[in-house]
């Protein structure tokens, strides 16, 4: 099969299209014919190399996959060949205390498709049948592939970890990113007031079209603006994935007793915290990564079967243009997801 691979960690030029063996599904697994695969920041981090991440090379990235079931492994029931699916990109052991409690993203052996194991930037991928989610036949694959990671992450971050409720307010940073485009919609569906910040004027305009009530320029002191706009109160939830570049202003934006949910650190992971602010304002700093199965299935149902949420696709490219797709994402030129078609 054709696949986008890298043979060693490093820059974009390490990516190439190569012939790789088509994988075979083992017991409990399915072979999926990939019809579309979306890029995420983790594809960039995996290509560059992460401390402690040991991969079988050449590596195939890609965790956001939509496609058709091609073949079923031994013991797989309830699925049929030709069925249209998206894939839950989280991989869990099913045996540890967290899995047994239904908290798969806390699994002690937690891995992500396309990061720790070969992913779907290829014509075929093998995944556990428990990771499949059925989608309607008429739903476009290119749009479907843009859904799994960002909507699952945004749902867990806002609804579970952030406890966002109707009538509350949320600040969403990096408004052009995939998770932000999901989070704006989820927060509106939950009945919250949405403040969205971006450095880029065009992205602020699109965030507004997507439902954000107020857009802010993150080149400016948005902490002060939030303070003014909320009558010196602050927002109930801040959704942080930018990290070093926005951290101090994010903490200034949260209400006393509020929640700062961190699900990424794209501008850098090291920040300072004034502990006096933490105990005086009594806010919580909460982490979020991916989702558990219940959250994944809930938000996928809202997208594919209730049509209350819409994956946002920036553009669709052939898989051959994977270098260009990495370049666009690295330069943050996109609004929403970059989708590749093998
Ligand atoms: Zn586990």
Image: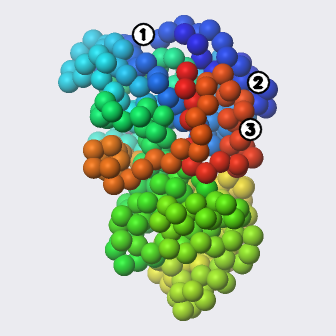
In the rendered picture of this protein, how many numbered marks are placed on residues? Answer: 3
Foreground pick, 17 / 273: 17
- Residue at 61% x, 89% y is 228
Cβ of mark 1 under 8 A from ligand 1: no
Residue 232, image x, y percentages: 56, 91
Foreground pick, 335 / 112: 335
Residues at marks 3 and 1 touching, judged by CB atoms closer than 8 Å: no
Q: Which residue is label 2 attached to?
A: 14
Q: Dot 3, crowdedness within 10 Å: few (<14), some or many (≥20)? A: some
Left/right placement of residue 231 relative to residue 91 reads right
Labels 3, 1: front one: 3
Q: Which residue is label 1 attached to?
A: 24
Q: Which quarter of the rendered picture does the N terminus lie within?
A: top right
Q: Which residue is label 3 attached to?
A: 327
Residue 329, image x, y percentages: 68, 43
Q: Say if 280 sits above or below 26 in the image.
A: below
Residues at marks 1 and 2 touching, judged by CB atoms closer than 8 Å: no
Residue 316, image x, y percentages: 58, 35
- Residue at 33% x, 27% y is 84
If you read the primary sequence from the N terminus, does the residue marked by circle 3 or circle 1 appear first? 1
Q: Which quarter of the rendered picture does the C terminus lie within?
A: top right
Cβ of mark 3 under 8 A from ligand 1: no
- Residue at 46% x, 22% y is 34
Per the image, label 3 sits on a secondary structure element best described as helix
Real-space Cα separation, disc 3 to disc 1, in angstroms: 32 Å
Q: Say if 331 sits above or below 226 in the image.
A: above
């Amino acid at each position: 099969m054709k696949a986008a691979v890298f043979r060693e960690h490093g820059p974009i030029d390490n990516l190439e299209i190569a012939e790789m063996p088509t994988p075979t599904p083992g017991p409990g697994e399915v072979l999926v014919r990939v019809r579309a695969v979306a890029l995420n920041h983790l594809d960039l981090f995996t290509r560059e190399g992460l401390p402690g991440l040991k991969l079988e090379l050449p590596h195939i990235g890609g965790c956001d996959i939509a496609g058709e079931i091609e073949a079923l492994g031994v013991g797989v029931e309830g699925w049929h060949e030709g069925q249209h699916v998206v894939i839950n990109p989280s991989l869990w052991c099913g045996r540890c205390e967290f899995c047994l409690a239904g908290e798969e993203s806390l699994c002690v052996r937690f891995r992500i498709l396309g990061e720790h194991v070969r992913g779907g930037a290829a014509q075929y991928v093998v995944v556990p049948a428990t990771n499949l989610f059925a989608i309607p036949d008429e739903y476009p694959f290119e749009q479907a592939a843009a859904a799994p990671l960002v909507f699952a992450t945004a749902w867990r971050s806002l609804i579970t970890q952030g406890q966002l409720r109707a009538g509350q307010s949320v600040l969403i940073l990096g408004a052009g990113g995939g998770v932000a485009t999901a989070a704006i919609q989820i927060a509106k569906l939950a009945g919250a007031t949405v403040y969205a910040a971006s450095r880029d004027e065009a992205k602020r305009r699109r965030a507004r079209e997507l439902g954000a009530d107020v857009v802010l320029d993150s080149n400016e002191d948005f902490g002060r603006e939030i303070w003014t706009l909320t009558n010196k109160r602050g927002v109930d939830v801040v959704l942080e994935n930018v990290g070093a570049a926005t951290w101090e202003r994010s903490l200034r934006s949260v209400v006393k007793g509020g929640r700062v949910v961190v699900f990424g650190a794209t501008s850098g992971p090291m920040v300072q915290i004034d502990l006096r602010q933490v105990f005086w304002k009594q806010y919580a700093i909460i982490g979020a990564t991916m989702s558990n199965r219940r959250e994944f299935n809930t938000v996928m149902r809202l997208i594919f079967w209730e049509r209350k949420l819409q994956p946002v696709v920036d553009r669709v490219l052939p898989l051959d243009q994977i270098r260009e797709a990495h370049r666009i994402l690295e330069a943050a030129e996109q609004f929403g997801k970059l989708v590749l078609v093998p």
